[in-house]
């Protein structure tokens, strides 16, 4: 992953400060340093997605779960702390809507999350917290 590659490059002295600074800016953007002051990481900060496209978190703790739950405009009953959503469809932060049925912007996937976690791990390992 990119995070592991960055840490390796740092250990060999081939990763310039501009790459590290760019990686930190991207992580900061995801965490809410953007024009909306909105974190795309669920549970981080004061403003974050409440309706991720995730079936289990949109179901109540008890009772049945079906399309009525998924199609509800209410926030998900369960918070997926630490999960990353897709984010805006364009460079415009206001192109993001917190709608559960928008799988492009609000889906929680392993590829988004693994890349994010790797990049954060590399920055921490390089002392760029």
Image: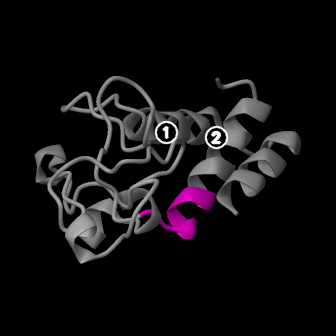
- Could you tell whether 33 is left or right of 25 in the image? left
The residue shown at (36%, 70%) is 65
Q: Residue at x 26, y 68 (%)?
A: 70
Residue 79, horizontal then vertical, whole percent: 44, 44
Residue 121: give x, y in percent of width and height.
72, 41
Is residue 9 located in the magenta-colored stretch of the structure? no
Q: Tell me, yes or no, if residue 101 can be seen here.
A: no
Badge number at residue 120: 2
Give the farthest residue toward the bottom: 67
Is residue 118 shown above or below 68? above
From the viewer's side, name the closer residue of 127 and 120: 120
Q: Which residue is mark 1?
A: 27
- Toward the front, the furthest residue is 63
Q: Which residues are magenta?
A: 108-114
Q: Position of residue 128 (x, y in %)?
A: 66, 25
Badge 2 local density, few (<14 within 10 Å), some, or many (20+)?
some
In percent of the image, x 50 and y 50: which residue is there? 83
Asked whether the beta carbons under mark 2 and mark 1 sit within 8 Å of each other, the answer is yes
What secondary structure is marked by label 2? helix
């Amino acid at each position: 992953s990119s995070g592991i590659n960055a840490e390796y490059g740092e250990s060999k002295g081939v990763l310039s400060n501009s790459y590290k600074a760019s990686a930190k800016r991207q992580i900061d953007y995801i965490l809410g340093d953007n024009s909306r002051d909105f974190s795309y990481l669920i549970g981080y900060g004061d403003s974050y997605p409440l309706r991720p496209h995730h079936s289990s978190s949109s179901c109540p703790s008890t009772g049945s779960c079906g399309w009525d739950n998924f199609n509800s405009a209410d926030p998900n009953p369960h918070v997926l702390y630490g999960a990353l959503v897709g984010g805006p469809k364009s460079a415009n932060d206001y192109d993001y809507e917190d709608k559960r049925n928008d799988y492009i912007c609000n889906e929680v996937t392993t590829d988004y999350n693994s890349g994010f976690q790797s990049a954060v791990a590399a920055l921490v390992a390089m002392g760029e917290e």
